[in-house]
Image (spheres, rainbow, N blue to C red):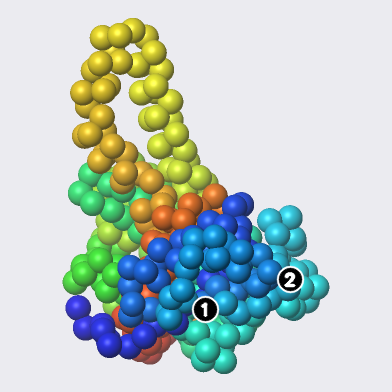
Amino acid sequence: MNMESNKIVRIAVDAMGGDFAPEYPVLGAIDAAKENRNIEVILVGPEGKISPILEKNSVSLKNLKVVNADEFVTMEDVPAEVFKTKPGSSLNIALKMQRENEADALVSAGNTGAVLSHSTLRLGRIPGIGRATIGAQLPTITGSTMVFDVGATVDCRPNHLVEYAVMGSIYVNNIFNNKSPKVGLLSVGEEKVKGNTLTLAAYEMLEKAPINFIGNVEGGDILRGIADVVICDGFVGNILLKEAESVLDLLKAKLKGYAEMGFIKKLRVAMMYGTLKKILKNFDYQEQGGTPLLGVNGVSIIGHGKSTPYAVKKMIFRAEEISRFEINKKIELKLKEINLK
């Protein structure tokens, strides 16, 4: 790992992002600042709402500070409009700080569309990138797989899929220490001739890209861990992600229903509780550290709207990793090797 360990990474947290803001983002920021003194956590939001939470928890940390923002983006706000209607929002100010080199990364569990649009408008895109992409980490039999895109762009062109593949490979290489990540293109069959107009054209381009492309993968291949990076358009990817997120709730409901069928079955579940807890942990979104928005000229981590303090803390740590590994610089250098026009 060749990260700059002595550099203080400044992470701006959108304190008003999420269903339980500002309490959960603030508590998560407190925990992160306590555990890692190599980061500076900047809580951006209404000081009048943040300070009482800090006071209640008797917080006095040198690496935790507050920047006031009187406005905030809600889940109901229209992403395309709120950038202009709420220029003083916590999200907008946090990104402005990053653009002006007052912060190194953004963490937000707020309106996903707004985080995406604000990040693109405030930070711009990495030279050579036509579309930013959101990635999600899914558990597999062999470990985990990153899927790009899971909702940033529902309609894209073949060259965008190649961009996702390059960015995803660099991300997995650095964050998960995978020297040569296997990249698969999500399609309806393994054969090269299977797919729609988008995937057929993308396949030809991916074969020539500077990545470890293994060809088409099917939906069932993802959880089997056939590929380390799976590429698809945001329409398909978002459906896939929402389905995957529902698996944990399904398993919990099934186990609860089984236990309620009698004392013996309840005892069986209780005896397996420790093992089950470890297995189900792999399906918990809180463990993933949010979803990275790759392609923007900065660091943006997007969290689930119902993110707990623990989830926010993990998002902050993931933002630090991406910043220290200088993922954006590596993406820009790799893109110079190929021509996606």
Query: Which part of the image, by quadrant, shows the N terminus?
Result: bottom left
Local secondary structure at mark 2: loop
Spatial CA distance of label 1 from label 2 is 18 Å
Where residue 296 is drawn, which disc sits there?
none
Q: Which of the 4 quarters of the picture holds residue 114?
A: bottom right
Residue located 65% across and 72% down the image: 47
Image x and y of residue 267, in percent: 25, 16
Residue linked to disc 2: 71
Q: For the residue marked with disc 2, what is the amino acid? A: Glu
Q: Earlier in the sequence, mark 1 or mark 2?
A: 1
Q: For the residue marked with disc 1, what is the amino acid? A: Lys
Q: Which one is nearer the viewer's eye here, 70 or 62?
A: 62
Residue located 42% across and 79% down the image: 63
Q: Nearer the viewer, mark 1 or mark 2?
A: 1
Tally of numbered discs: 2
Q: Which one is nearer the viewer's eye here, 136 or 218?
A: 136
**Residue ranking furthest to the right:** 85
Q: Reply above or below: 325 against 239.
A: below
Crowdedness near tag 1: few (<14), some (14–19) or many (≥20) residues, C-alpha within 10 Å:
some
Residue located 29% across and 70% down the image: 175
In this rendering, would 225 be left or right of 285? left
The answer to whether one can see residue 61 in this image is yes
Image x and y of residue 27, in percent: 49, 60
Image x and y of residue 189, in percent: 36, 46
Image x and y of residue 5, in percent: 26, 84
Where residue 65 is drawn, which disc sits there?
1
**Residue ranking furthest to the bottom:** 100
Q: Which of the 4 quarters of the picture holds residue 209?
A: bottom left
The answer to whether one can see residue 153 in this image is no
Q: Which one is nearer the viewer's eye here, 14 or 293?
A: 14
In this rendering, would 224 be left or right of 301? left
Residue located 73% across and 71% down the image: 71
